[in-house]
Image (cartoon, rainbow, N blue to C red):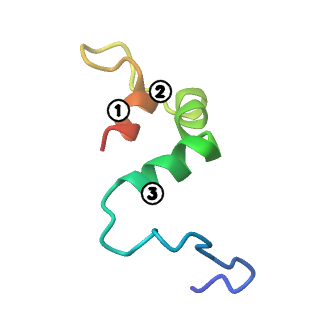
Amino acid sequence: MVNESAVVVFDDARAVANAGVMLPALLAQRLGLEQLIEECVDLGDRPGAANPGRKVMTM
């Protein structure tokens, strides 16, 4: 399924395809994904289940 209502535009001449993870990480931060994941994801009470948003942001 292709969503044609969304258009991705890079207006920075320094943003290149091989720039690594900085561009997607910055986008995720600006979109507030860490906070959204903290609110929506519950990993239970087992060891290592804390901070699911931070875990996603480090991937």
Give above or below for 1 relative to 35: below
> Which residue position holds label 3?
23
Residue furthest toward the right?
5
Distance Cα–Cα, label 1 vs label 3: 18 Å
Choose the circle earlier in sequence order: 1 or 3.
3
Give yes or no for contact between labels 2 and 3 (Cβ–Cβ under 8 Å): no
Give above or below for 14 relative to 46: below
Please give the name of the residue rendered at 63% of the width and 76% of the height, measured from the top-left corner. 9
Give yes or no for contact between labels 1 and 2 (Cβ–Cβ under 8 Å): no
> Which residue position holds label 1?
55
48 horizontally vs 2: left or right: left
Q: Give the camera-side residue of 40 and 23.
A: 23
Which element is circle 1 on?
A: helix
- Percent position of residue 31, x then y: 63, 46
Please give the name of the residue rendered at 40% of the width and 39% of the height, measured from the top-left corner. 57
- Percent position of residue 48, x then y: 26, 18
Which element is circle 3 on?
A: helix
Quadrant (top left, top right, bottom left, bottom right) of the N terminus = bottom right
Kind of residue at badge 3: Leu
- Percent position of residue 52, x then y: 41, 29
Choose the circle earlier in sequence order: 2 or 3.
3
Please give the name of the residue rendered at 30% of the width and 44% of the height, measured from the top-left corner. 59
Give above or below for 56 relative to 17: above
Please give the name of the residue rendered at 62% of the width and 39% of the height, measured from the top-left corner. 32
Distance Cα–Cα, label 1 vs label 2: 12 Å
Q: Give the camera-side residue of 7 and 11.
A: 11
> Which residue position holds label 2?
42
Choose the circle earlier in sequence order: 1 or 2.
2
